[in-house]
Protein backbone atom coordinates (compact mmCIF):
# COMPACT_ATOMS: atom_id res chain seq x y z
CA UNK A 1 0.00 0.00 0.00
CA UNK A 2 1.32 3.45 -0.85
CA UNK A 3 1.90 5.94 1.94
CA UNK A 4 -1.36 7.69 2.80
CA UNK A 5 -1.31 11.50 2.61
CA UNK A 6 -3.55 13.78 4.63
CA UNK A 7 -4.24 17.50 4.53
CA UNK A 8 -5.75 18.75 7.79
CA UNK A 9 -7.10 22.26 8.12
CA UNK A 10 -8.59 24.12 11.03
CA UNK A 11 -7.70 27.08 13.13
CA UNK A 12 -8.32 30.51 14.49
CA UNK A 13 -8.85 29.22 18.03
CA UNK A 14 -7.59 26.35 20.16
CA UNK A 15 -11.04 24.79 19.76
CA UNK A 16 -10.34 24.18 16.06
CA UNK A 17 -6.59 23.49 16.33
CA UNK A 18 -6.59 20.94 19.14
CA UNK A 19 -9.01 18.50 17.43
CA UNK A 20 -7.01 18.80 14.19
CA UNK A 21 -3.78 17.82 15.97
CA UNK A 22 -5.50 15.01 17.90
CA UNK A 23 -6.83 13.53 14.63
CA UNK A 24 -3.35 13.78 13.05
CA UNK A 25 -1.75 12.06 16.05
CA UNK A 26 -4.21 9.16 15.89
CA UNK A 27 -3.76 8.79 12.11
CA UNK A 28 0.01 8.80 12.64
CA UNK A 29 -0.29 6.09 15.31
CA UNK A 30 -2.17 3.90 12.83
CA UNK A 31 -0.15 4.87 9.71
CA UNK A 32 3.40 5.59 10.95
CA UNK A 33 4.67 6.37 7.42
CA UNK A 34 1.77 8.70 6.49
CA UNK A 35 2.52 12.23 5.30
CA UNK A 36 0.70 15.22 6.75
CA UNK A 37 0.28 18.85 5.79
CA UNK A 38 -1.70 21.35 7.82
CA UNK A 39 -3.24 24.45 6.26
CA UNK A 40 -4.19 27.43 8.42
CA UNK A 41 -4.74 31.18 8.38
CA UNK A 42 -1.36 32.87 8.09
CA UNK A 43 -1.58 35.19 11.10
CA UNK A 44 -3.47 32.93 13.53
CA UNK A 45 -2.30 30.80 16.45
CA UNK A 46 -2.17 27.57 14.42
CA UNK A 47 1.01 28.87 12.74
CA UNK A 48 2.78 28.39 16.12
CA UNK A 49 0.77 25.55 17.69
CA UNK A 50 0.93 23.09 14.78
CA UNK A 51 4.74 23.16 14.35
CA UNK A 52 5.05 22.78 18.15
CA UNK A 53 3.04 19.56 17.75
CA UNK A 54 5.53 18.36 15.12
CA UNK A 55 3.66 19.00 11.85
CA UNK A 56 4.36 21.31 8.93
CA UNK A 57 1.82 23.98 8.06
CA UNK A 58 1.14 26.42 5.24
CA UNK A 59 -0.78 29.64 5.80
CA UNK A 60 -3.52 31.20 3.69
CA UNK A 61 -4.31 34.91 3.53
CA UNK A 62 -7.84 34.58 4.90
CA UNK A 63 -9.92 36.00 7.73
CA UNK A 64 -13.55 35.85 8.72
CA UNK A 65 -16.14 38.47 7.89
CA UNK A 66 -16.58 41.08 10.63
CA UNK A 67 -20.14 41.84 11.71
CA UNK A 68 -19.84 45.50 10.77
CA UNK A 69 -18.61 47.40 7.73
CA UNK A 70 -14.82 47.47 7.90
CA UNK A 71 -11.86 47.69 5.54
CA UNK A 72 -11.19 44.01 6.35
CA UNK A 73 -14.63 43.10 4.99
CA UNK A 74 -13.93 45.00 1.78
CA UNK A 75 -10.81 42.83 1.40
CA UNK A 76 -12.72 39.59 1.98
CA UNK A 77 -13.40 38.76 -1.73
CA UNK A 78 -9.71 39.35 -2.54
CA UNK A 79 -8.58 37.18 0.37
CA UNK A 80 -11.05 34.45 -0.57
CA UNK A 81 -9.84 34.37 -4.19
CA UNK A 82 -6.20 34.31 -3.03
CA UNK A 83 -6.93 31.47 -0.56
CA UNK A 84 -8.78 29.38 -3.13
CA UNK A 85 -5.93 29.79 -5.61
CA UNK A 86 -3.26 28.90 -3.05
CA UNK A 87 -5.37 25.96 -1.79
CA UNK A 88 -5.66 24.70 -5.38
CA UNK A 89 -1.84 24.77 -5.74
CA UNK A 90 -1.33 23.07 -2.35
CA UNK A 91 -3.82 20.28 -3.09
CA UNK A 92 -2.45 19.66 -6.62
CA UNK A 93 1.11 19.50 -5.32
CA UNK A 94 0.52 17.44 -2.16
CA UNK A 95 -2.02 15.01 -3.71
CA UNK A 96 -3.83 14.04 -0.47
CA UNK A 97 -5.91 10.89 -0.11
CA UNK A 98 -8.33 12.65 2.26
CA UNK A 99 -8.73 16.27 3.36
CA UNK A 100 -10.04 16.85 6.90
CA UNK A 101 -11.47 20.16 8.13
CA UNK A 102 -12.08 21.06 11.78
CA UNK A 103 -13.57 24.52 11.20
CA UNK A 104 -12.39 28.07 10.63
CA UNK A 105 -12.14 29.98 7.36
CA UNK A 106 -8.89 28.39 6.16
CA UNK A 107 -10.51 24.96 6.19
CA UNK A 108 -13.31 26.34 4.01
CA UNK A 109 -11.00 27.15 1.13
CA UNK A 110 -9.08 23.86 1.25
CA UNK A 111 -12.13 21.60 1.55
CA UNK A 112 -13.92 23.48 -1.23
CA UNK A 113 -10.97 22.94 -3.59
CA UNK A 114 -10.56 19.28 -2.57
CA UNK A 115 -14.21 18.47 -3.24
CA UNK A 116 -14.04 20.25 -6.64
CA UNK A 117 -11.07 17.99 -7.49
CA UNK A 118 -12.92 14.83 -6.40
CA UNK A 119 -10.80 14.23 -3.27
CA UNK A 120 -12.74 12.81 -0.28
CA UNK A 121 -13.39 15.32 2.51
CA UNK A 122 -14.34 14.93 6.17
CA UNK A 123 -15.75 17.70 8.35
CA UNK A 124 -15.40 17.57 12.12
CA UNK A 125 -17.98 19.93 13.69
CA UNK A 126 -17.30 20.66 17.36
CA UNK A 127 -20.31 22.81 18.22
CA UNK A 128 -23.99 22.20 18.83
CA UNK A 129 -24.65 25.03 16.35
CA UNK A 130 -22.39 24.78 13.28
CA UNK A 131 -20.42 27.69 11.91
CA UNK A 132 -21.05 29.14 8.48
CA UNK A 133 -17.98 27.47 6.89
CA UNK A 134 -19.04 23.92 7.75
CA UNK A 135 -22.67 24.54 6.78
CA UNK A 136 -21.53 25.65 3.31
CA UNK A 137 -19.18 22.67 2.91
CA UNK A 138 -21.60 20.01 4.13
CA UNK A 139 -23.36 19.30 0.83
CA UNK A 140 -20.13 18.16 -0.83
CA UNK A 141 -18.44 16.48 2.17
CA UNK A 142 -18.19 12.69 2.27
CA UNK A 143 -18.56 12.45 6.06
CA UNK A 144 -19.53 14.87 8.82
CA UNK A 145 -18.43 13.92 12.34
CA UNK A 146 -20.49 15.76 14.95
CA UNK A 147 -20.31 16.14 18.73
CA UNK A 148 -23.98 16.82 19.45
CA UNK A 149 -27.29 15.23 18.55
CA UNK A 150 -30.06 16.84 16.48
CA UNK A 151 -27.97 18.54 13.79
CA UNK A 152 -30.15 17.23 10.92
CA UNK A 153 -31.44 20.74 10.26
CA UNK A 154 -27.91 21.83 9.29
CA UNK A 155 -26.36 18.74 7.71
CA UNK A 156 -27.52 15.87 5.45
CA UNK A 157 -28.51 13.09 7.86
CA UNK A 158 -26.98 10.27 5.80
CA UNK A 159 -23.51 11.85 5.98
CA UNK A 160 -23.54 12.56 9.72
CA UNK A 161 -22.06 10.48 12.49
CA UNK A 162 -22.14 11.25 16.21
CA UNK A 163 -18.50 10.84 17.27
CA UNK A 164 -17.90 13.51 19.92
CA UNK A 165 -14.95 15.90 19.99
CA UNK A 166 -11.33 14.74 20.16
CA UNK A 167 -9.93 15.42 23.63
CA UNK A 168 -6.54 14.93 25.23
CA UNK A 169 -6.15 11.25 26.05
CA UNK A 170 -4.56 12.05 29.42
CA UNK A 171 -7.93 13.37 30.67
CA UNK A 172 -9.54 9.95 30.65
CA UNK A 173 -7.75 8.83 33.85
CA UNK A 174 -8.00 12.03 35.93
CA UNK A 175 -9.90 10.17 38.66
CA UNK A 176 -6.68 8.41 39.68
CA UNK A 177 -4.52 11.56 39.81
CA UNK A 178 -5.95 13.55 42.75
CA UNK A 179 -2.98 13.04 45.09
CA UNK A 180 -0.47 13.91 42.36
CA UNK A 181 -2.53 17.00 41.46
CA UNK A 182 -2.67 18.30 45.03
CA UNK A 183 1.12 18.03 45.28
CA UNK A 184 1.74 19.55 41.83
CA UNK A 185 -0.37 22.65 42.55
CA UNK A 186 0.59 22.76 46.24
CA UNK A 187 -3.03 22.55 47.41
CA UNK A 188 -4.56 21.78 50.82
CA UNK A 189 -6.31 18.39 50.77
CA UNK A 190 -9.00 19.45 53.27
CA UNK A 191 -10.21 22.45 51.21
CA UNK A 192 -12.41 22.34 48.13
CA UNK A 193 -10.72 23.65 44.96
CA UNK A 194 -12.40 26.00 42.48
CA UNK A 195 -10.95 25.96 38.96
CA UNK A 196 -11.66 29.05 36.81
CA UNK A 197 -11.11 28.63 33.04
CA UNK A 198 -11.38 31.38 30.44
CA UNK A 199 -10.01 29.53 27.41
CA UNK A 200 -6.49 29.78 25.97
CA UNK A 201 -6.58 33.57 25.57
CA UNK A 202 -8.59 34.28 28.71
CA UNK A 203 -12.06 35.76 29.24
CA UNK A 204 -12.26 39.39 30.30
CA UNK A 205 -15.73 39.20 31.86
CA UNK A 206 -14.91 36.08 33.91
CA UNK A 207 -11.68 37.72 35.14
CA UNK A 208 -13.61 40.84 36.19
CA UNK A 209 -16.12 38.64 38.01
CA UNK A 210 -13.49 36.69 39.96
CA UNK A 211 -11.66 39.88 40.92
CA UNK A 212 -14.89 41.46 42.21
CA UNK A 213 -16.05 38.30 44.01
CA UNK A 214 -12.66 37.18 45.40
CA UNK A 215 -13.47 37.98 49.04
CA UNK A 216 -16.87 36.29 48.75
CA UNK A 217 -15.30 33.17 47.17
CA UNK A 218 -12.56 32.88 49.79
CA UNK A 219 -15.19 33.27 52.53
CA UNK A 220 -16.58 29.91 51.31
CA UNK A 221 -13.42 28.23 52.67
CA UNK A 222 -12.07 27.23 49.25
CA UNK A 223 -8.82 27.52 47.29
CA UNK A 224 -8.78 28.89 43.75
CA UNK A 225 -6.81 28.08 40.60
CA UNK A 226 -7.58 30.96 38.25
CA UNK A 227 -6.45 30.64 34.63
CA UNK A 228 -6.80 34.25 33.50
CA UNK A 229 -5.21 33.91 30.03
CA UNK A 230 -1.98 35.38 28.72
CA UNK A 231 -3.69 38.58 27.55
CA UNK A 232 -4.75 39.41 31.11
CA UNK A 233 -1.96 37.96 33.27
CA UNK A 234 -0.28 41.32 33.93
CA UNK A 235 -3.58 42.69 35.27
CA UNK A 236 -4.30 39.87 37.70
CA UNK A 237 -1.00 38.28 38.76
CA UNK A 238 -0.98 40.57 41.84
CA UNK A 239 -3.62 38.27 43.38
CA UNK A 240 -0.99 35.52 43.65
CA UNK A 241 -0.05 37.25 46.91
CA UNK A 242 -3.43 36.25 48.40
CA UNK A 243 -3.54 33.06 50.41
CA UNK A 244 -5.40 30.17 48.66
CA UNK A 245 -5.27 31.91 45.24
CA UNK A 246 -3.12 30.88 42.26
CA UNK A 247 -3.34 33.01 39.12
CA UNK A 248 -1.94 31.37 35.98
CA UNK A 249 -1.68 32.66 32.41
CA UNK A 250 -1.82 29.15 30.98
CA UNK A 251 -2.09 25.62 32.38
CA UNK A 252 0.27 22.99 30.95
CA UNK A 253 -1.07 20.03 32.93
CA UNK A 254 -4.80 20.14 32.24
CA UNK A 255 -5.12 16.54 33.44
CA UNK A 256 -3.82 17.47 36.89
CA UNK A 257 -5.79 20.70 37.20
CA UNK A 258 -9.01 18.84 36.41
CA UNK A 259 -8.04 16.12 38.90
CA UNK A 260 -7.57 18.80 41.58
CA UNK A 261 -10.83 20.64 40.88
CA UNK A 262 -14.01 20.11 42.89
CA UNK A 263 -16.04 22.78 41.06
CA UNK A 264 -15.32 24.52 37.74
CA UNK A 265 -16.33 27.91 36.34
CA UNK A 266 -15.74 27.91 32.58
CA UNK A 267 -16.54 29.34 29.18
CA UNK A 268 -18.45 26.87 27.02
CA UNK A 269 -16.36 26.58 23.87
CA UNK A 270 -16.72 23.15 22.27
CA UNK A 271 -13.37 21.74 23.48
CA UNK A 272 -13.93 22.88 27.07
CA UNK A 273 -17.41 21.33 27.13
CA UNK A 274 -16.13 18.01 25.76
CA UNK A 275 -13.28 17.93 28.29
CA UNK A 276 -15.61 18.72 31.19
CA UNK A 277 -17.94 15.88 30.13
CA UNK A 278 -15.02 13.45 30.25
CA UNK A 279 -13.63 14.62 33.61
CA UNK A 280 -17.15 14.87 35.03
CA UNK A 281 -16.76 17.94 37.25
CA UNK A 282 -19.67 20.03 38.58
CA UNK A 283 -19.54 23.12 36.37
CA UNK A 284 -21.00 26.60 36.12
CA UNK A 285 -20.85 27.69 32.47
CA UNK A 286 -20.59 31.40 31.67
CA UNK A 287 -20.87 31.43 27.84
CA UNK A 288 -19.16 34.12 25.81
CA UNK A 289 -21.85 36.20 24.09
CA UNK A 290 -19.28 37.47 21.55
CA UNK A 291 -18.92 34.35 19.39
CA UNK A 292 -20.52 33.56 16.03
CA UNK A 293 -24.20 32.64 16.28
CA UNK A 294 -23.97 32.52 20.11
CA UNK A 295 -22.83 28.91 19.87
CA UNK A 296 -21.28 28.90 23.38
CA UNK A 297 -24.73 29.41 24.92
CA UNK A 298 -26.08 26.62 22.71
CA UNK A 299 -23.21 24.29 23.71
CA UNK A 300 -23.85 24.96 27.41
CA UNK A 301 -27.62 24.57 27.07
CA UNK A 302 -27.15 21.12 25.49
CA UNK A 303 -25.57 20.05 28.82
CA UNK A 304 -27.82 22.08 31.13
CA UNK A 305 -30.96 20.65 29.48
CA UNK A 306 -29.80 17.20 30.62
CA UNK A 307 -29.16 18.48 34.16
CA UNK A 308 -25.40 18.13 33.69
CA UNK A 309 -24.28 21.69 34.53
CA UNK A 310 -25.42 25.16 35.59
CA UNK A 311 -25.46 28.23 33.33
CA UNK A 312 -25.30 31.93 34.14
CA UNK A 313 -25.45 34.44 31.30
CA UNK A 314 -22.97 37.30 31.50
CA UNK A 315 -25.88 39.73 31.76
CA UNK A 316 -27.18 37.88 34.88
CA UNK A 317 -23.87 37.60 36.80
CA UNK A 318 -24.54 40.59 39.07
CA UNK A 319 -27.83 39.22 40.34
CA UNK A 320 -27.22 35.46 40.29
CA UNK A 321 -23.57 34.54 40.77
CA UNK A 322 -23.25 34.53 44.57
CA UNK A 323 -26.48 32.59 45.09
CA UNK A 324 -25.74 29.98 42.41
CA UNK A 325 -22.15 29.47 43.59
CA UNK A 326 -22.88 29.22 47.32
CA UNK A 327 -25.79 26.82 46.67
CA UNK A 328 -23.49 24.56 44.63
CA UNK A 329 -20.35 24.63 46.80
CA UNK A 330 -22.36 23.82 49.95
CA UNK A 331 -24.46 21.04 48.40
CA UNK A 332 -22.53 17.78 48.02
CA UNK A 333 -25.57 15.93 46.63
CA UNK A 334 -25.99 18.53 43.87
CA UNK A 335 -22.29 18.26 42.98
CA UNK A 336 -22.55 14.48 42.66
CA UNK A 337 -25.73 14.73 40.56
CA UNK A 338 -24.21 17.22 38.09
CA UNK A 339 -21.01 15.18 37.92
CA UNK A 340 -22.82 11.92 37.13
CA UNK A 341 -25.09 13.57 34.52
CA UNK A 342 -22.35 15.42 32.62
CA UNK A 343 -20.28 12.20 32.49
CA UNK A 344 -23.14 10.41 30.72
CA UNK A 345 -22.71 12.86 27.82
CA UNK A 346 -19.00 12.09 27.33
CA UNK A 347 -17.78 10.40 24.14
CA UNK A 348 -14.23 9.45 25.15
CA UNK A 349 -13.38 7.48 21.98
CA UNK A 350 -14.10 10.37 19.60
CA UNK A 351 -10.65 10.55 18.00
CA UNK A 352 -10.51 6.83 17.19
CA UNK A 353 -14.08 6.87 15.84
CA UNK A 354 -13.30 9.82 13.54
CA UNK A 355 -10.13 8.12 12.27
CA UNK A 356 -12.11 4.95 11.47
CA UNK A 357 -14.37 7.09 9.25
CA UNK A 358 -11.35 8.70 7.56
CA UNK A 359 -9.77 5.29 6.87
CA UNK A 360 -12.87 4.18 4.95
CA UNK A 361 -12.25 6.99 2.44
CA UNK A 362 -8.61 6.16 1.61
CA UNK A 363 -8.64 4.75 -1.90
Image: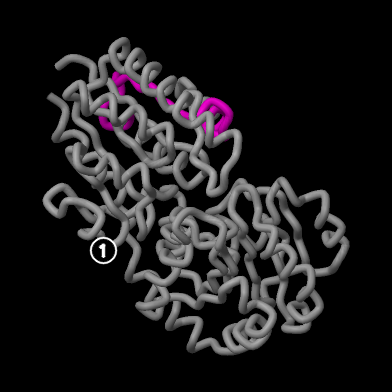
Q: Residues within 10 Å of mark 1 (few under 14, many from 20)?
A: few
Residue 92 place in picture, x, y as percent: 28, 12
Q: Residue 54 or 273: which is nearer the viewer?
A: 273
Whether residue 363 is visible here, answered yes or no, is yes
Image location of residue 239, percent across then percent down: 84, 62
Part of the protein shown in magenta: 28-50
| Residue 232 sits inside the magenta stretch | no
Could you tell whether 303 is left or right of 116 in the image?
right
Query: Relative to 158, is 120 above or below?
Result: above
Residue drawn 54% across the image and 65% down it: 287
Q: Looking at the picture, how far across and down is residue 90, in whole percent?
A: 36, 15
Quadrant holding the C terminus:
top left
**Residue under the point 19% across and 37% down:** 140
Q: Is residue 160 left or right of residue 320?
A: left
Query: Element type at marker 1?
Result: loop
| Residue topped by disc 1 | 149
Residue 127, quarter of the rendered image: bottom left
Amino acid sequence: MKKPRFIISGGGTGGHIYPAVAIANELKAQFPDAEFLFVGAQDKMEMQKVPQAGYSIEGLWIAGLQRKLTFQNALFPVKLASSLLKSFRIVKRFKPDVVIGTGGFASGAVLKVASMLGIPTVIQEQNSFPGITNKLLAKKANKICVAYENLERFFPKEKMMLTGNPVRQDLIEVGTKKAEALTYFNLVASKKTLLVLGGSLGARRINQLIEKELDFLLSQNIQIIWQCGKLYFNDYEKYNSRENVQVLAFIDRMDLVYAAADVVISRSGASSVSELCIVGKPTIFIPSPNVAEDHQTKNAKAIVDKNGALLIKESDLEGQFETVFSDLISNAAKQIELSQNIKKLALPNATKTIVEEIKKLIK
